[in-house]
Amino acid sequence: MTMRWITLGLGLWLVVSTLVLPDTTASRANVAVTGALIAFTSLWALRAPPARFINTMLATWLFFSTLFVDHVDKAAAWNDLLVASAVFVLSLWPLAEPMPAQPAHA
């Protein structure tokens, strides 16, 4: 469950980063929308764990779109690439460890 809270924070950071880091209008729009969707999906995944795979797709989108959209500042591009990578890894992290098997009662 902690992973979903971390991806929520990363999604919110993406939205805030568009206000802090200089970038093109197209890149800002892409990052803000993707960040908001990551944050929303992270909340959704708290109740429906398979929803975390939507964040896998969103992180993939953010990573590759960052490579193809022009950027004013390399810091903004690196921020987007690193956050996309983190969200990708965290979205594949299982919700919890499997519970150990209970002994059978005879």
Image (spheres, rainbow, N blue to C red):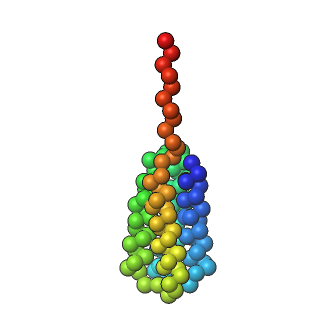
As drawn, which residue projects farthest toward the top? Answer: 106
Observer able to see residue 54:
yes
At 40% from the left and 60% from the top, the residue drawn is 57
Left or right: residue 54 compared with residue 22: left
| Total numbered circles | 0
Where is 17 relative to 46, above or below?
Answer: below
Q: In the image as oriented, which residue stretches furthest toward the bottom? A: 72
Front residue of this view, candidates 15 and 64: 64
> Relative to 63, does residue 90 appear above or below in the rendering?
above
Q: Which residue is drawn at 58% across and 81% down?
A: 21
Q: Is residue 28 visible?
A: no
Identify the residue shown where x is 51% and y is 42%: 97
Judged left or right of residue 20, residue 105 is: left
Residue 46 or 81: which is nearer the viewer? 81
User: At which x and y percent is residue 64?
Assistant: 38, 72
The structure residue drawn at horizontal position 47% and vertical position 73%, both measured from the top left corner, is 81
Q: Position of residue 15 (x, y in %)?
A: 57, 70
Q: Which quadrant holds residue 19?
A: bottom right
Compared to 39, does 44 lie above or below? above
Q: Percent x, y for residue 27?
A: 47, 79
List x then y, in percent, for residue 62: 44, 70
